[in-house]
Amino acid sequence: MTNDHNHDHEHDHDHEHEYITIIDEEGNEDLYEILFTFDSEDFDKSYVLVFPSGTSEGEEVELSAFSYKEADGGLEGTLSAIETDEEWEMIEEVLNTFISDEEAD
C-alpha cells in the first residue's frame, strides 16, 4: 500500500477543527467537535463521529456517532441515532481503523 502523503508541508490543515451544534431533546445546544465523517455504501448513509468540544488532548472522551443527511449547501443536516447493531459494528470497525492509522503516523 502506498502512501502519497507528503510530510514536508505545513500541518495547519490537519489541525482545523470542525464543530457541530447538537440540540438535545430538552432544546439545549451543545457544541461538539467532529472527529471524522465517512460514508457507508452498505447502509447508503453518511456518518459523523463527534465528541464534546473543549476536551483536552489525552483526556478520555465519550464519542457519539450519528448518521446524517446533509441539507442543500452542506451547512445543515439532519442527525439520526444509530439504530441497528450492524451499523454499530461497522462504525466500530471504521473507528478502530481510524485510530490505528492515527497511531501509525
Image (spheres, helix red, strand yellow):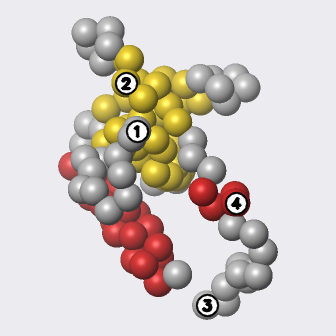
* Residues at marks 1 and 2, CA–CA distance in whole angstroms: 8 Å
In the drawing, what numbered circle is on residue 87?
Answer: none
Q: Residues within 10 Å of mark 3 (few under 14, many from 20)?
A: few
In percent of width and height, residue 85 lies at 21, 49
Q: Residues within 10 Å of mark 1 (few under 14, many from 20)?
A: some
In percent of width and height, residue 76 lies at 59, 23
Assign a secondary structure to mark 4. helix
Q: In the picture shown, does residue 21 fall above or below 9? A: above
Assign a secondary structure to mark 1. loop
Q: Residue at x 26, y 37 (%)?
A: 83
Mark 1–mark 2 CB contact (< 8 Å): yes
Q: Residues within 10 Å of mark 2 (few under 14, many from 20)?
A: few
Q: In the picture shown, does residue 20 fall above or below 23? A: below
Mark 3–mark 1 CB contact (< 8 Å): no
Q: Residue at x 70, y 60 (%)?
A: 12
Question: Counting residues from the N terminus, which is met first, the one under dot 4 or under dot 1?
Answer: 4
Question: Counting residues from the N terminus, which is met first, the one under dot 2 or under dot 4?
Answer: 4
Q: Amino acid at mark 2?
A: Asp
In the drawing, what numbered circle is on residue 30?
Answer: 2
36 with respect to 26 (left or right): right
Q: Amino acid at mark 4?
A: Asp
Q: In the picture shown, does residue 47 fall above or below 19? A: below
* Residues at marks 3 and 4, CA–CA distance in whole angstroms: 26 Å
Q: Amino acid at mark 1?
A: Ser
In percent of width and height, residue 102 lies at 47, 73
Mark 2–mark 4 CB contact (< 8 Å): no
Assign a secondary structure to mark 3. loop
* Residues at marks 2 and 4, CA–CA distance in whole angstroms: 26 Å
In the drawing, what numbered circle is on residue 53?
Answer: 1
Q: Which residue is mark 4?
A: 12
